[in-house]
Image (cartoon, coloured by chain):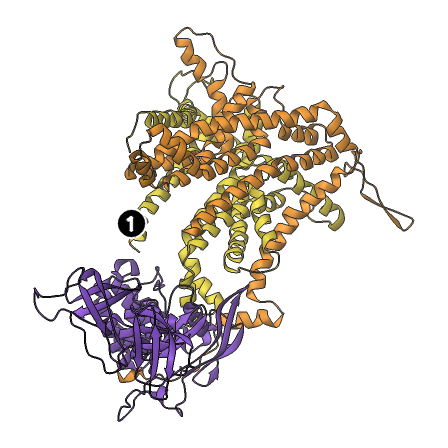
Chain colours: A purple, B orange, C yellow
Amino acid sequence: MAKKPQLAIDTRPWRDPDAKPFVRIKNVTKRFGDVYAVSDVSLDIYKSELFCLLGGSGSGKSTLLRMLAGFEQPTSGSIEIDGQDMTEVAPYNRPVNMMFQSYALFPHMNVEQNIAYGLKRDHLPPAEINNRVAELLSLVKLQDYGKRRPHQLSGGQRQRVALARALAKRPKLLLLDEPLGALDKKLREETQFELVKIQETLGVTFIVVTHDQEEAMSLATRIGVMNSGEIAMIGEPTDIYEFPNSKFVAGFIGSVNMVEGIVIEDEPDHVRIRSGELGCDIFVGHGVDCAPDQILWWAIRPEKITLSRDKPENAEDANVTQGIVEEIGYLGDMSVYQVRLESGKHIRVTQTNTVRGNPDSITWDEQVYLSWDDNAGSVLTV
Amino acid sequence: MSSFDTEAPPPRPRRPWTVVERGLAAVGLSGKALVIAAPAIWLTVFFLVPLLVVFGISLTVKQFGRPPYTPLLTNEDGTVQLTLHLNNYIRLFTDGLYISAYLSSIKIAFISTVIALCIGYPMAYAIARAPDQWRNILLMLVILPFWTSFLLRVYALTGFMRGNGVINNFLGLFGIEPLVMMQTDFAVYVGIVYSYLPFMILPLYTNLVKLDGALLEASADLGARPLRTFLTITLPLSMPGIIAGSMLVFIPAIGEYVIPALLGGPSTLMIGRVLWDEFFANTNWPRASAVAVAMLVVVVIPIMLLQKAQDAVQDRERAK
Amino acid sequence: MRRGWFLPIAASLGFAFLYAPIVSLVVFSFNESNLVTVWSGFSTKWYGALLADPQMLGAAWLSVQVAFAAASIALVLGTLCAVALVRFRKFRGRTVLAGTASAPLVMPDVITGLALLLLFVAMEATLGWPAGRGLMTIVIAHSTFCTAYVVVVVQSRLSDLDLSLEEAAMDLGATPIRVFFDITLPIIAPALVSGWLLAFTLSLDDLVIASFVSGPGSSTLPMVIFSKVRLGVSPDVNALATIIIGIVALGVLAATLLQLRSRPRKARA
């Protein structure tokens, strides 16, 4: 895999091998009967991170979150928060708060009482409770709604009350279970940035569980992709998208074209893969951990492929194939082409519509060439 | 926002609940154990044990004295002796009275259940399909009698059906001879249907109101006439409601005492009444106990059916 | 869906069947004559007779005491039982407890009554308690079968209750007992009220079980009514029935109105 360029001053502690993780999940397994909801997950999360656990339903992401909150006990393994072992600590004694997917606002209490609930459990003096509640209400822009009951609020307002309530005790770690899941698309996009802003202002460590990859990509400092109880990959959003480590991750995030091929040249600085499906050789401009004659997969994102009517030149006699346009989906900002190769394999290509109302654009049933850069695709062995 | 640094919370003072919890823990009790233990002990002592006592006493015979049955365990010269009598059970099978009482109870309960279903189903369906503003009122009208005294409602029926009762007075206006309704099996049917109709309607209503109207439209759209739609869509889907409602009428009807006592004639045989008479009139406690044990066996099957219907409903809700 | 004429007519007849006897009962409670079924003029004299009947009044007072005590005991036991069944998903004997808690619902009254009487007699013989039968034994018997009804009512409300509300409270620092009193109890309060009322009504209404477990001199109201109407109709029972029906109707009406008023809120929440 290619080395990513290093920033001059790196503010990302996960890149520093000496940094001390804030949350340390070590070999945690959770079994319900015979079902492994979470199996052998190890994960380090650093202070002030906004970490997203991304996965489909049943991937174990929520169970992992509930173990952090203390609602479930790990079957084996341990969880440390800020250097303290949390395994035996009851939920009500953890320095952790959670924002629930359903918000779980107490219906018989008004907004202020909801926010003050956790503070009262800590027996703070009433004056301080009032101050903090006022502070939180202004943080989430609900100053005028303190006396309302949850059912008198809109979905977005309820979401903000839930956030304020979870932040009230100034937790070291905030867990958010699908925080935007119940909002409609437009509101979700607005709230997303609000959430990041609040997280950055307060510097609290966030762990967000979501099934929405766009949400994860735009919120997170790092993402942990989960699949059937295991962590499939941990990385920054760009790593996850551009450098997936497995077929699962490549297919789970965004759309991807995946072809099978066989290694015919294995050199330290390049690899050549022959793919019958693709109808050409793939020249990869960096070394890959593989052996000659090994069968592996090559994945490429639709936007990394270029379409042309004329055959592009390629010095290595690779990375160019041809096919026929079968379908075009016009999405406004871009168009999605479905191209059928000679092998019958369909390839998805997206092209940005840079020319307005282009009369000369590629159209149905045209014979086209597909080409890509040496480093445009990912070679996957698992 | 400088106050939002994540410092450690201030030390917590001791709270009353913590003290309570620690106190319980000190004597080896968690709150959880107490929550389970209180109802479990009560129900064991006052529900399960009594049933065992009934079974035990059903194996003794009547004697004069207090208590009016022979002891199960006797202690003679240090040896404890267990004496079991099967006389009561033998009598149940040989004396025609008991067998015909059982059969007649089942027959009466069954017929009443069918009648209640025939009356209750259209009512439940009508309420479920009624406009929203009407539905709650109609439902309340169904529940209202359920909250009024059962005994008084049965009494109301006697005033209605007796020789010079409301119905016969009404018929008399047209010169029709008075009908004999009281003290017949007919009156018992009416009584059971009348008393338990709400039990039939409510589970049916809960089922039917959840029926998706689009299913009926789809059926009509595919060419089914209303009757066919009802028979092939509505009826099968409301089966759990039908079973639950029927069992809720059938089970209490089997053991009914008040209705046959007030409305039935001397020839209306029902086990509940036989048990009552064995106990109060003949003071034969062991025989009454044997009747009770046999009666339990009869109601167990419908109870299991009911349980199954309710599980089916729960499974379906969970699947959603 | 096309609405035919069949359903409305069937429903009307059904409601007529349910209400005609009650209406006639109420009407004839104001009858001058002591023939309960022939109208001879308006009078409230049967209400007067009722209030002057010490036996009736004594029995009514006993029944109210029993119902109050039994409903309260049943409320506590039933709520605990429902919490155990809904919230503690796994413990030894859960199935047994669930079965035992719902069995009294379907147990024929004659069996429950007989069984409890035999238990009380056996306990008195071996333990010396309860000494004789009366208020105490009726309360115990009623609490037992009413508990089952409270369990049903509270259980269904509890299982509708969003578990994450309780988790949220715990997450904010409340211990389990605190969670129960701060969150669970206030939210299920309406179910507790209706459970208590149901238990109260059922206890007030019970004839069969009370007949078994009561002692001499402790006749409940249904027992007195039963012995009266067994001998034939008596207009003062009509008067009593009218009073009871009136109270119940008002109660149910109030409850329905309260529920209707709170429903639109719930729908939005």
Q: Would you say C206 lies left or right of C168 here? A: right
Residue A138 shows in the view: no
The one of A370 and C108 positioned closer to us in this rendering: A370
Question: Quick one: which residue is furthest to the right in this view?
Answer: B77
Instruction: Give the vertical position of A262 relative to B152 (above or below).
Output: below
From the image, which quarter does the N terminus of chain A lie in? bottom left
Query: Which image quadrant is residue B38 in?
Result: bottom right
Residue B232 x/y as whole percent: 40, 33
Query: Which image quadrant is residue A337 in?
Result: bottom left
Instruction: Give the vertical position of C195 relative to A158 (above or below).
Output: above
**Badge 1 amino acid:** Pro
Q: Would you say B24 lies left or right of A270 here? A: right
Crowd class of label 1 (few under 14; some 14 to 19; many from 20; radius 10 Å): few
Q: Would you say A215 lies left or right of A17 here? A: left
Question: Quick one: which residue is furthest to the top in this view?
Answer: B175
Residue C83 x/y as whole percent: 51, 57
Residue shown at the point (33%, 88%) measured from the top left: A269
Residue shown at the point (63%, 42%) measured from the top left: C134
